[in-house]
Amino acid sequence: MKIEGMLKDQALKDKTILITGGGTGLGKSMGKYFMQLGANLIIASRKEDVLEDTAAELMRETGGKVLPVGCDVRNYDQIQGVIEKGIEFFGKIDGLVNNAAGNFVSPTERLSHRAFDIVVDIVLKGSYNTTLALGKRWIKDNTPGVILNIVATYAWTGSGYVVPSACSKAGVLALTRSLAVEWAKYNIRSNAIAPGPFPTEGAWSRLLPGNLKDQFMPQENVPVGRMGEHQELANLAAYLMSDYSSFMNGEVVTIDGGEWLKGAGEFNHLDRVTPEMWDSLASMRKKS
Ligand code: HXC
Ligand code: NAP
């Protein structure tokens, strides 16, 4: 199945969107589609060489403009620097995608307090740093803004073995819903996306390290029987960043093929019962 772009041409025309972690993975895929819809991008993360390569590639492929700016989202001053450079270059920033993340799998009792900190600092502190810095600027300049936070379904279910990430994504979801109400009066909307498994080098190498990737097939837990395609996520993200979603505020949209509900439903494990077993249960019921 080839998934195509879904929004009208130029749906993001003249919008400038800041994507943290926009040099790789899902951030890059969302950014590419935003540009195909007419947006300019600011991409910000730690590895400047990766950002430069992605910026060159996206500009070549789409004909749009990308400003790559090196920064660590844990550092508020560096985030302010990104915003200043972005406004100087493009004149304004219309939207923010909090996409940068750090994660790894580990039994929680094996984590050092520094390891716990590092994930919380990137995911939760990084997201509130960018939100606070850009939000203050939007409010001061009386400019509208749109925020999209990339969370995970374990923001509300919790999950073992990724506990610092689960705690952080829960905090980011609370940030989304809280500011959706508080900042609506400033014409700033906040929404979130909770993706299920979408293959990326960054996530896969850290969540299925070594031979774990041969033992666990993420798609086996997905009722629709496959992983997500980046364009599917990009379509949803572009809608949430566009004016078409002006009445969406404080929402978290799950795009996971039904994965988290499969884990939650009390009788969902009965999908292991074969048709023959159902036949035999039916005939036992009829006899009795
Ligand atoms: C246990 C670990 C560890 C691991 C690092 N640490 N990796 N502990 N298991 N696998 C510990 C270290 O021992 C150290 O603690 C502390 O964490 C800091 O480690 P550093 O290597 O110094 O940190 P750094 O180089 O800054 O790396 C940060 C990182 C790294 C988070 C560890 O993975 C990273 O940069 N990731 C960015 C990209 C990423 O993770 N993308 C995936 C997002 S996927 P001590 O005590 O020894 O000092 C995602 C998907 C969600 O979020 C849902 C999927 C369905
Ligand atoms: P990824 O390619 O590893 O993306 C993570 C990005 O965050 C990288 O570009 C990284 O760039 C940046 N980053 C990490 N630490 C940073 C820091 N301190 N400051 C600035 N940038 C930092 O992984 P991905 O799969 O695309 O993940 C993107 C988002 O989707 C994340 O929020 C993740 O939690 C979420 N998500 C992914 C999946 C999935 O299946 N892929 C599922 C659910 C949720 P640098 O290394 O250059 O800093």
Image (cartoon, rainbow, N blue to C red):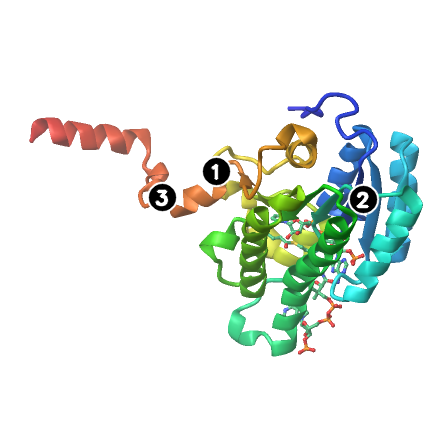
Q: Quadrant of the C terminus?
A: top left
Q: Amino acid at mark 1?
A: Gly
Residue position marked by numbered label 2 in the rendering = 93
CA gap, disc 1 and disc 2: 34 Å
* Label 1 CB less than 8 angstroms from ligand 1: no
Residue position marked by numbered label 3 in the rendering = 265
**Residue closest to the eye, 269 or 255:** 255
Residue 12 to residue 155: above or below: above
Secondary structure beneath label 3: loop
x and y percentages locating residue 181 in the rendered image: 55, 47
Residue 173 to residue 282: above or below: below
x and y percentages locating residue 253 in the rendered image: 55, 39
Q: Residue furthest top?
A: 8
Secondary structure beneath label 1: loop
Residue position marked by numbered label 1 in the rendering = 258
Q: Quadrant of the N terminus?
A: top right
* Residue in the image at 57% along x and 65% along y: 164
Q: Earlier in the sequence, mark 1 or mark 2?
A: 2
* Residue count near mark 2 (Cα–Cα under 10 Å), binned few <14, some 14–19, many ≥20: many
CA gap, disc 2 and disc 3: 42 Å
Q: Amino acid at mark 2?
A: Ile
Q: Earlier in the sequence, mark 1 or mark 3?
A: 1
